[in-house]
Amino acid sequence: MGNWIINHGLTAFILVVWMGINIFLFVYFYFFYDLGEQFFYTRHLLGSALAWARAPAAVLNFNCMLILLPVCRNLLSLIRGSFICCGRTMRKQLDKNLSFHKLVGYMIGLMTAVHTIAHLLNVEWYNNSIRGEYDALSSALSALEDGTNTTYLNPIRSNSTSVQAPTYFVMTTLAGITGVIITLALILIITSSMEVIRRSYFEVFWYTHHLFVVFFIGLVIHGAGRIVRSQSTTDPPHNTSFCSNRSDQWGEIPECPVPQFAGGFPQTWMWVIGPMFLYLCERLLRFIRYIQRVTYRKIVMRPSKVLELQLVKKGFKMEVGQYVFLNCPAISQLEWHPFTMTSAPEEDFFSVHIRSAGDWTDKLIEMVQQLPEGAQGPKMGVDGPFGTASEDVFDYEVSMLVGAGIGVTPFASILKSIWYKFKESNPKLRTRKIYFYWLCRETHAFEWFADLLQVLEAEMEERGMGNFLTYKLFLTGWDKTHATHAMVHFDEDKDIVTGLKQKTHYGRPNWDKEFEQVRKENPTSVVGTFLCGPAVLGKTLEKKCVKYSDVDPRKTKFYFNKENF
């Protein structure tokens, strides 16, 4: 339990607080509408569906306030910078922004379903009441209106089945139309966000997700329909307990004046106006960055269809492990894709390595391959840089870096920066040991990164620090031919795949063995474990961090960090 608290304690606390607020809002507003005296007559028409419609609405307001904040990337980078003097555990929460964004989205979807079903029942019961299918009180309440038709209770104002059917009412009122629009928009947003669609048809996910603009506009307008109405104060006051059984005497005796009703003031805009303004500023800043000129320093086509772009932008500053969003107008004006930078902060350019992994990357690689030698590439918009978990790598005495395939990119930046720090004898380098693991399916994938490792290997040996960097490369997609070839050349000084002194391992790592070794070699250290790779591997490493962390503060503790885009 203690190990789990080390890695997940603060995250769990934040989720408990968030869920607690949701539960409080739901329960408070449920009883507010279910017990409130001003809703006595409204409940007579609608029953418990009134509370079941309004309680989810309060939860929706709260979560719609939160949903935009985790995707305000510049805001998160600003907060991360302001927490630089705070504990790494606090900054680590910012790396879970997309997970929280999804969680809030699920809550919005659930509450929308409850809210919608309850209001569909409300409309049906309103319609039945105006048609006189219930008791005398329901008929009397549904018949109420004044000269300006503003103090009614039942929003369905006619009992004509041909004109004022529930479907017609929903499609011709402000609350009904906006409700249908925002529900359809939400359905499209949620369904297109499923991983199978996001991975295979990213463009579908990208474009439908921008229906959030329609969703928020409809959400702000939705409450202006004022469908749910409460009793207003009159002089003399209308006593519901005395007058509810005397509807035929309303307005005829002093104790029972005709009850007056009014719709509630719209409140949703007050919840979401702040986040909407912040997000608008976010998009404005992205646009300003987009129009800034970007030039190509170098374009290199690496093995395994990996494209390296070395770019230059005036005033651009980065830290290790950060990422940028790229937009190529020649491919799509609207699509932005994240890429981790592989350059070091000490270099006068920034670089990204782009693997062929979809329509957008395929088109970009095809365009670059057709360029004449030495020509500038297509116009490129750059937004960023943005912070990630890897920024904290130098805050740990010992770091474990795990990359899978092209997921090695943030660690290229880290290792390059280490090389520069050693070259300049930087006294601020706190890290004293790095373990680097790279898992690849094919041998060609190692080629573009092997040069950097060779330079680091030579640099460490020259400075007598050969133990500073321990790296292990794992070839996961090997066959009998690879194994036989490796056995024949096993006695050679350098690896036949990478040309490095460290031999390539065939198969997947035994993580229990690796963590046990790291703990044994660093018995009193805080170890940062960083992953850029698939979620399945992330779950495995997260469990190992919990398993091998010691509650005793004097012994080894592992903290898990994962790149999230």
Image (cartoon, rainbow, N blue to C red):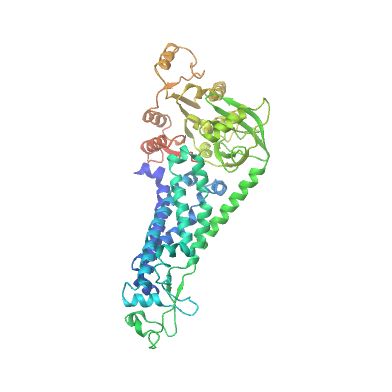
Query: In the displayed structure, does residue 374 sit left or right of residue 272?
Result: right
In the image, residue 230 sits, relative to residue 67, either above or below, namely below
In the image, residue 504 sits, relative to residue 252, either above or below, namely above
Query: 400 or 17: which is nearer to us?
Result: 17
Spot occupied by residue 422 in the image (x, y as percentages of width and height): 59, 29
Query: In the displayed structure, does residue 163 sit left or right of residue 77?
Result: left
Query: 288 or 177: which is nearer to us?
Result: 177
Query: 290 or 497: which is nearer to us?
Result: 290
Spot occupied by residue 461 in the image (x, y as percentages of width and height): 54, 21
Query: 223 or 418: which is nearer to us?
Result: 223
Q: Residue furthest front?
A: 162
Quadrant placement of the N terminus: top left
Residue at screen point 51% across, 51% down = 211
Spot occupied by residue 336 in the image (x, y as percentages of width and height): 56, 41
Residue at screen point 51% across, 52% down = 212
Q: Quadrant of residue 372?
A: top right
Spot occupied by residue 281 in the image (x, y as percentages of width and height): 60, 52
Q: Quadrant of residue 247?
A: bottom left
In the image, residue 507 sits, relative to residue 565, either above or below, namely above
**Residue 188 appears in the rendering:** yes
Residue at screen point 34% across, 72% down = 44
